[in-house]
Amino acid sequence: MKNFLSFLILFLILTACSFSNSTAGVPGTLDSSFAANGMQILTPSTGFENANDLVILPDNKIVSVGFTTGALGDWDIAVFRLLQNGAVDSTFGVNGFTIFDIAGNYDYGNAIYRLDDGKLLIAGGATLPNWADIDYFVARLNEDGSLDETFGTNGITQIHTDGGEDLFYSIAVQPDGKIVLAGQDNVGGFTYMNGALMRLNEDGSIDETFGDDGMVITDIDYDYSQFRDLILNEDGSIMAAGSCANDKYDILLAKYDSDGQPDAGFGDGGIKVLNLNTGTDDAFAIIRHPIDGRILVGGRIGHGSSKTDLLLMAVNESGDPDSSFAENGLAVLDIKAMEAFTDMTVQENGKIVLCGSSGGTGLGSNDWTIARFNEDGTIDSTFGESGGYTITEAGSFFSEAEAVAIQSTGRIITVGIAANDNNDMGILAYYGDDIATGIGAIQTSAKSSVSVYPNPSSGAFTLTLNTDENMEGDVHAQIINQVGQIVYEHSAEVQRGSFTQEFNENIIAQSGMYVVKVIAGAKEFTGKLLIEK
């Protein structure tokens, strides 16, 4: 009897612990171990401030960029760093913050990118002293948060074009170190605006070999257009996503070759406009799925003048909706009246995580939103508080997530606006999957390809890694099943960026979908393998 009672007590304890852990760790719910119950709200000033973008460092620290109100009431660029657990990292900048002024008035910090050497690129716009124009800017910071004075002029490159409101929204870096930026070009004195790309050299100077003296202006038959995000393809081509409008907004996609010339095989002369519905259609994010290669676009789809829904769309290489994804290429999530996805990333298991806002039509009604979709575009019902999504009231008045990334532990990090009396900087953390390292979270400029042939395979296959970098040394290959277990590991040597290994049919016993991971130094490359026994 004593042994039975001991066993029963132990069983109840283990059952309770198991229930507690599984409840607390539901993917897509706030991670209570981060900051204060999953939320960190920062108020470096008494005025308005936003957090607009973030990167995850290799040690899982979080760096974010936005703006804060300065002593004279203007807006200054603000970059801050948090520890993995959400506490402010006081070793960065001054007490965790680097705050600097660009041109004396209102500055907008919109995008951040971590270089392979640990330095940080910051981009956005800066209002000139005469208040007439907003100019582009790019800055580079050292790892400790100080301005890198070897870049541009004392760490900052300002670019004046033809006046108007000129802003960068996104950064990517080529394998040769050149910096590609996407945004908008507003012609001074006029209301119309064009999508814009620009390329800089590593030192911050304009690369005049790109486009027209370093710039590509997408001047199409619309009064208003802008690019909000971009991706670099393995062949060096560039894709950008945003919106264009005359009487209503439509999704704008564009593709250019590595020199900034339009890709004639994409859309209509390199431009694709998608009019999806009767209301406002916008694209705020674009990525290429690292496992299946799909081009994914996140944003919103409109219904008349007073409703938008959350949108995840897949397009093919010509820019048309990919009919094999979701419903005719469109995954639409209708929660409330006015909502949009603003950013997305992909977990290592292929699931797609997006963030944004959802709310009513009234001022101040929107709340922080995060959702997850399966690789085929169906909503992941195991995620969040409401069968695929979670809505969080991060601010008493208004809140919106602007960017999302994933720590190597699987924890999902989002940053954005948490408006209370004023706008504050919000950083919210959610539970993720244990194996869900964010492929887009630790950025790399490497062009790479992991291929498995044949795929599907009956068991025997060849794994190949090709990268433009001249990597040398050991690589570590892993085969991971759908529940995150490593079923096979193998170490070998990479020479001049290439690695090939043949696997026999006995290493994987069961049919199913597997993730293939190749770890080379500080970089990870992934592919997908289907085994059919």
Image (spheres, rainbow, N blue to C red):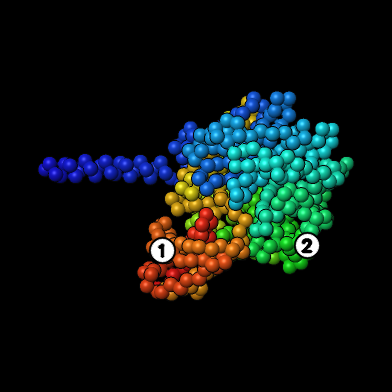
Residue 79 x, y percent position in the rendering: 63, 37
Between 479 and 382, the one nearer to me in the picture: 479
What's the residue type where badge 1 is placed?
Answer: Glu
Residue 290 in sight from this viewpoint: yes
For the residue labelled by badge 1, is the local secondary structure a helix, a strand or a loop? strand
The residue beneath circle 1 is: 489
For the residue labelled by badge 2, is the local secondary structure a helix, a strand or a loop? loop
The numbered mark, 2 or 1, whose residue comes first in the sequence reads 2
Quadrant of the rendering where the N terminus is positioned: top left
Relative placement, left or right, of 363 versus 130 is left
User: Which circle, 2 or 1, is nearer the viewer?
Assistant: 1
Residue 394 in sight from this viewpoint: no
Label 1: how many Cα within 10 Å (few below 14, some 14–19, many 20+): some
The residue beneath circle 2 is: 261
Quote the CA–CA distance across marks 2 and 1: 43 Å
Between 166 and 93, the one nearer to me in the picture: 93
